[in-house]
Image (spheres, rainbow, N blue to C red):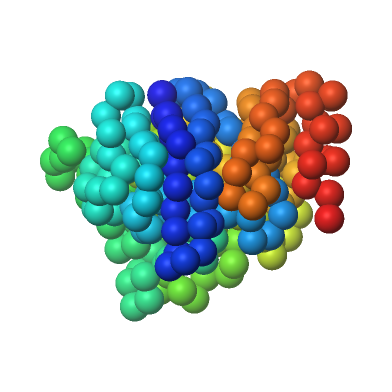
Amino acid sequence: MLKIDGLHVHYGLSHVIQGISLEAKAGEVVGIFGRNGVGKTTLMKAVAGWVQPSGGGIALDGQSFGGLTPDRICRHGVGFVPEDRRIFPGLSVEENLKLGLMQRLDRSRASDRAAVQGIYDRFPRLAERRRQTGTTLSGGEQQMLAMARVMIGAPRLVLIDEPSEGLAPMIVADIFAIISEMKAAGMIVLLVEQNLSGALAVSDRFYAIERGAVILAGRAREENARQQLMKAIAV
């Protein structure tokens, strides 16, 4: 289980995250919704260690990791797919993928090869472009690479920030299918997404955020909760 308890994050004098608490269980997708600038991405970055909390706690399966460096948090089993994807320039698709293997604690050449082949079996387009520089892929292919790079590390918790932004509807459907596969594999998924209908279709529960605080929580499949969410985040 992921447990965030009374989390606070400051950027200088700006109090961006103001006491957020939430929980997510294995095999569960939890949507994080809200208007632009309310703190959703900052929340994800705080869990991943990209920004340091100024208060509160973050724990995964009872192990606290709030305030640790990103590399140590990664080794706790946390994978992050940021909004800008962070595909490494100058590296091929396969080299980008293999960076994700660093998250695995028990590695061998045979297990690495099997993990890479498993990704290629799931993402044949990446297999076709394995020698191509990652930053020359299309936007949809780069998003698939970013998600595959996290999946290859077999994380317990995956943070995904705006995966469908700017992508064609067919690619968006593929992205949500990948998220469903992560859920089926028993991963915890925190999902920030503006495509509300698509995100709710794969989510089990949701939290709505306004001004750095949770203003609503509910079950994604309950119509009343969905209607409340629409009203809560309406511009």
24 w.r.t. 90: above or below: above
Q: Give the residue drawn at x 60%, y 61%.
A: 140
Residue 67: percent from left, percent from top: 29, 48
Residue 85: percent from left, percent from top: 48, 62
Closer to us: 42 or 20? 20
Closer to us: 77 or 132? 77
166 w.r.t. 45: above or below: below
Residue 165: percent from left, percent from top: 67, 60
222 w.r.t. 35: above or below: above
Answer whether residue 65 is visible to the viewer in this image. Answer: yes
* Farthest residue, direction front: 13
Q: Give the residue drawn at x 37%, y 70%.
A: 88
State the quadrant of the N terminus: top left
Q: Quadrant of residue 73?
A: top left
Q: Is residue 216 left or right of residue 162?
A: right
Q: Is residue 111 left or right of residue 133?
A: left
Q: Give the residue drawn at x 85%, y 41%.
A: 231
Residue 161: percent from left, percent from top: 55, 53
Q: Quadrant of residue 222?
A: top right
State the quadrant of the C terminus: bottom right
Question: What is the count of numbered marks?
Answer: 0
Q: Is residue 139 left or right of residue 131?
A: right
Answer whether residue 161 is visible to the viewer in this image. Answer: no
Q: Give the residue drawn at x 74%, y 49%.
A: 195
Q: Is residue 208 left or right of residue 183?
A: right
15 w.r.t. 5: above or below: below
